[in-house]
Amino acid sequence: MLRKQDMRGPMSRFDIIGQLGSLRRYARSLTRDSAEAEDLVHDALVRAYERRGTFRSGGNLRAWLLSIVHNAFIDGLRSRKSEAARVEQAGYLADASMQAPQEHSVRLAQVREAFFKLPEEQRSALHLVAIEGLTYSQAAEASGVPLGTLMSRIGRARAALREMEDKLPARVKSHLRIVGGP
């Protein structure tokens, strides 16, 4: 339980633990997925902690926390929509480029397809490091995630691409190397 010092008197309860049930139910209603709901509640609680000074003493803590959950959900939707638009635009730009010789063109299309099948957070992390050339620290800062989270996402993305690579016949994969691959 977090406690907040009230300037007018003794410690008042800032009971976030007691609100978890409501927060989880609302997040589940918004996301329609248990794992996403837990992530949303976590993100909202981090925001609430960071902005705890804005909570008015005597205000409705439950309503304040639920509004933070809602805003975090909307921010996530906007972020995913924006990322999808960037990925789509990148696809148009890639399609407009000059075609490689047939063998390489097919292979690049396979790699591109595998890259676009990665979950958004993995694709974004790998893009920042492998394509944009950012350091892990810079990419973590740009993504707004801790360094360890970014490294984990990149590791999972590379593993997924390696798995795709291992399923291809040797003659197809002879000229290209997956980032982080053997």
Image (tube, grey):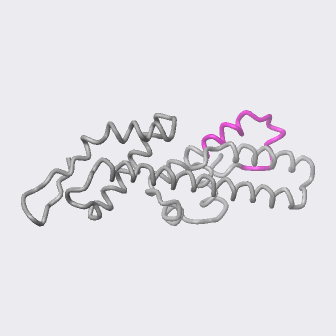
Quadrant hosting residue 47: bottom left
- Would you place residue 35 above or below residue 151 in this image? above
Can residue 169 be found in the magenta stretch? yes
Relative to 129, 145 lies left or right: left
- Would you place residue 162 above or below residue 131 in this image? above
User: Image point 77% across, 55% down: which residue?
Assistant: 91
- Would you place residue 48 above or below residue 17 in this image? below
- Would you place residue 59 above or below residue 17 in this image? below
Magenta stretch in the rendered image? 158-177
Residue 70 pos. (x, y %): 44, 50
User: Image point 77% across, 50% down: which residue?
Assistant: 176
Residue 157 pos. (x, y %): 60, 46
Residue 65 pos. (x, y %): 34, 50
Q: Report the front residue among 148 and 66.
A: 66
Quadrant hosting residue 28: top left
User: Furthest-left residue in view?
Assistant: 10
Please state the total of marks drawn on the protein image: 0
Q: Report the front residue among 117 and 17.
A: 17
User: Image point 61% across, 60% down: which residue?
Assistant: 128
Relative to 97, 59 lies left or right: left
